Structures are given as structure tokens and as C-alpha cells.
Image (spheres, grey):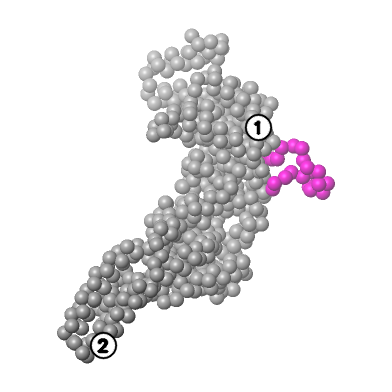
Amino acid sequence: MTKKKRMAAAIIKEEYGNVPSKAFCHFAEAASGYFRHNKAGFHVDDITWNDLSGDKVYERMDYTKSAAGSEVLYHFLRNTCFDEKELEHRHAIAKAVSEDEKLRTELSLLFMQIGNTGKYSLFDYLDHLELVRTKSNLPQILLDLLYLPVIALLFYAPDIAVTLLFFMICISIMTYFNKKGKISAYLVSFGYILRMIKGAKLLGRKNYKELEKEQKELKECVHRLDGFRRFSGIAMSMNNPFGSSNPLDLFLDYIKMIFHIDIMKFYQMLKVVKAHRQDIERMFYLTGYIDACMSIAFYRASLDKYCVPKLYSDCIQDGGQTGERCKEKVVLEAEAVYHPLLNNPVPNSITIKQGVLLTGSNASGKSTFLKTIAINAILSQSIYTCLADKWNAPFVKTMSSMALKDDVMQGESYFMVEIKALKRILDECPRSDEKVLCIVDEVLRGTNTVERIAAACQIMKTLQKESTICLAATHDMELAELLADKYANYHFEETIENDDIHFRYELKDGPATTRNAIRLLQMLGYQEDITKAAETMAEGFLQNGKWE
């Protein structure tokens, strides 16, 4: 093993069981490339992804070593899986990697050699390559053949021949740099494809039990792309003219500039790319798939605790012996579940048999708990891992309406943005072939109290259907009463000691019994006449039901 590989292996060993190393960071825009180009069916939409700080969650678990790995891992998270066998296969690869340090190091080094594509995804490059017009090499070959009669002319009219040669060489060199300038940018994608082919060939020579399916497909792709790889060094050297002081290399550089052999090779490779784009994309996915599954193993090793979720589509009575479908709602059970981005998270447990309505004071933990459930639902169906002691749940489509903002550019108020976000969930629920896990924070906070409570109550009733599992948070205690027959009430609370508020972030049964908004004003130094008058008004309303 070379010194460079030894250093890389040391970094890999240090990274396993810790947070991801910055040595293998990827460009955020490039990471979403595969997902952007391969959206199919239901996926975690932008609203939900932003609500859950999806990019930060992804960055925390991204241990991939190649661009393909980073993009496929991102795709896992956005295109949640509803196939248990597929999830078990990802788990099997991750498990094999976690149990075998040699395998872990070998594969990591291999994917490091494949490397990154830079700022852009390979799919962005491939899209641009589609715009490059494929040219026949025949005109250039004919021009190159013209040198033969001119060289022959040296024996009969050397003065004329030398003059012709001079002009022909000058024109060739000038047109060479013009053509080269138009196509050299595309060599980045060619370079990555070549590294993928090399990596796939190396993978094919190994005997990895858990990767037999991927290895077989990769071998087929490599075989079909053999024409792309053969003599590719001619085109790839285009970006490095005069890059060596070796006389032979300098001579070869002039040969390329005069006869354009590297440009001709480029167009031949371009034809192969366009003809075999599906094979390139498949190779990209397969290499990225293995790298992403390795990332699952690295991520699991960095966690204090996790579990492999138990997922199901239907509820069967008698342990599935009678075959009778259960008439009760499917239960989601999470034990000691926690949020992946918190340094010292407080685990909570919940068993959901109907909708859940969370109440509690400001900053008590309602939103964080909702995000915890949503994120773990996504992780269960992407990396087959939950940050919990136990996670039993149906396959779900996770959708949320939480961290919304008004859209100044579109001229939409917060309320308009909010009702559109809720409408997309209401539209998905009746047409979905899977359960919809809908997470809503502060239903219709953007409008007046009377209409908010009335509309929110009806929306929440609609969301509590057979096809949905709804968790919502609210400050409106009226909703807790109006929806008591459809939603189980839970709350978070705080304690006040020595003029300071302490949050325990522990989920408790029943609706909230405390409030702290005015208290927080006092603690932040608001004028006493404001806080006292506000407290008096609030107490009067609670007693009489009227504002005075």
C-alpha cells in the first residue's frame, strides 16, 4: 500500500464511529443531482424536506467517498422505499461492512479513487453533452491525409512543399485550440466515467457475497462501455498540452495539435456516451448504491443507539394466523426515539392509535418532537435505521406543514402559503395507496382566532382518516377539547425556578396545563405595566370568556 493509501486508510479508520470527515465533503448542489433527474412516484417534497432541515440531516450521515455515493444516499432520503426486501438488502450490505474492517477499507479506498465530479452532478454534465453536436471524424481524416501529397512534394518542389506544410500546420494548430476550447469542459464528465469503469472492473474482480447482484450488473455495463475506455488517454490528455518536459511527450503534443487525433477520439467517445447513456447512469447508480450502503454502516457506528425498524403495510389479527384484516387503525410505536441533529437529545416514547395533538408552552419541544417522528419515519424507509430503541410502524408517505414563510417574490402572504401547504396533504391522503404520515405545526396560525379554530378543527377531522396518521401541535386549547374524540392529547411542560424557566422536553399524557408567554416577556425585561396588564387580561378571559 502506497503512502497516500495508508494516509487515506488512517482517515477512514478514524472516521468510522465518529462524525463525517471534512476530507470527503461534497458540493450540496451536486448531491441532489441524481434525485433531480430521477424523480418517480411519491418523494419527500421540498416543503417537507425544508421543514425537517433535510440538508443538515443528510450532511450528518454522509460518509460517502464518491460523487455517485453522495447522490444515491441523497436519493435514498428523498425517494423513500416501500419495498421491505430492498431495505433488507441495503441493511445486509451495511451489516457486512460494519463487521469486516478489511472490506470497509478496501471499498472506501476504491470509491475514493472514483472521487467527485466537482460542483455539478454527472447528470448535469450528461445533459449538456446531449447538446453537443456529434461530428463525423471523416473530414478531419481527409484533411490529415492531405499531408501525404505535400510531403511527397518535398522531393520535387521543396520550397513550395515547405510553404504549404507551414501554412497547413499553422491552420491546424489554430483550429485545434478553437475546437479544444469548445469541448475541454466536457472532459470532467469523461474522466469520472472512466474512473467509474475502472472502479467497477476492480469491484468485479473481488468476491463479495452481499454485492453479487451489483457486481454482475456492473460487469455488463463495463463490457458495453469498452469502446469508450479503449485509448481514452488520447482524449483525456487534451487538457494538458506541454504538460511534460519529456521530449517524447512534447513531440506527441505537437502530433495531436497537427492531426487533431485527441479531438477525433473525443467525438468517438461522445458517440458512445450518447448511445450508452442508460449504461452510464446504471453504473453510476450501482457504484453509488454500494457507497451509500457503506455510509449507512458508518452512520450507525457513530450513533449511541439505533434500531432496525419493523415495517408493515397491513395490520393482521392473531399474529397473521387468521388472515382477517384488523379493523383498528394501524399503530405507530416509537420507543425512546430521538432527533438526529441534537447533541444531547431527550428520548421520548409514544404509541399512536389515533391522531395526536400536542400542546404546550413556547419552546417546550413540540416542534422538535414532531420533526423527530417525521425524520425517523423517513430514515426507516431509506437507510433502514431509526434513532430509537424500537420503531414499529406502517410504510408511510411523510408530508409536513411546519416551517413555512411568506413568499414575497410570488406576492403570497403567510396564510396563502400555509393553506396551499395543507391542501397538498389533503389532496394526497384520499388518493394514496399507502398511509400518509402528516405532520402539522400550528394549524392556520396565519389568520384570526375564530376562523382559525373553526377551519383548523374541520381540517384536522378530515386528516384523521383511515389513510392517514396525523400529528399536530397547537397553542389553541379549544382544539384539544373539540377534537378529544379523534385525537389523543399529549403535551410538553416547563418548570419555573428562581425566575428562570427549565424545559425537560419530556412527552406527557393529556393537554397542557401551563402557559409561559407573558412570563417570558417578564424574564426578558419587558416593562412591568405591560406584563401585569397582559396577565390581568389573560386571567379575566380565562375566568369570564370575555376580553376586558
Residue type pointed to by label 2: Ala
What label sits on residue 210 in the rendered view? none
Q: Closest to the observer: 308 or 518?
A: 308
What residue is at 52 percent from the left and 24 percent from the top?
A: 515
27 above or below 503? Answer: below
Residue at position x 24%, y 72% from top? 171
Q: CA distance from mark 1 to mark 2?
A: 89 Å
Q: Please, what is the dominant secondary structure of the magenta stretch?
A: loop
**Residue 489: quarter of image:** top right
For mark 1, give the secondary structure: loop
What SS does tag 2 mark?
Answer: helix
Q: State the extent of the magenta-drawn residues as a range.
A: 312-333
Is 331 inside the magenta-drawn segment?
yes
Q: Is residue 47 above or below residue 530?
A: below
Of badges 1 and 2, the one in the foreground is: 2
- Residue 220: say if magenta: no
Position of residue 533 measured from the top left corner of the image (x, y, whole percent): 43, 13
Q: Which mark is residue 464?
A: 1
Circle 2 is placed at which residue position? Answer: 152
Residue 491 screen position, x and y as percent: 58, 30
The amino acid type of the residue labelled 1 equals Gln
Crowding at label 1, few (<14), some or many (≥20) Cα neighbours within 10 Å?
Answer: some
Sequence order check: which comes first, mark 1 or mark 2? 2
Relative to the observer, which residue lies in front, 301 or 64?
A: 64
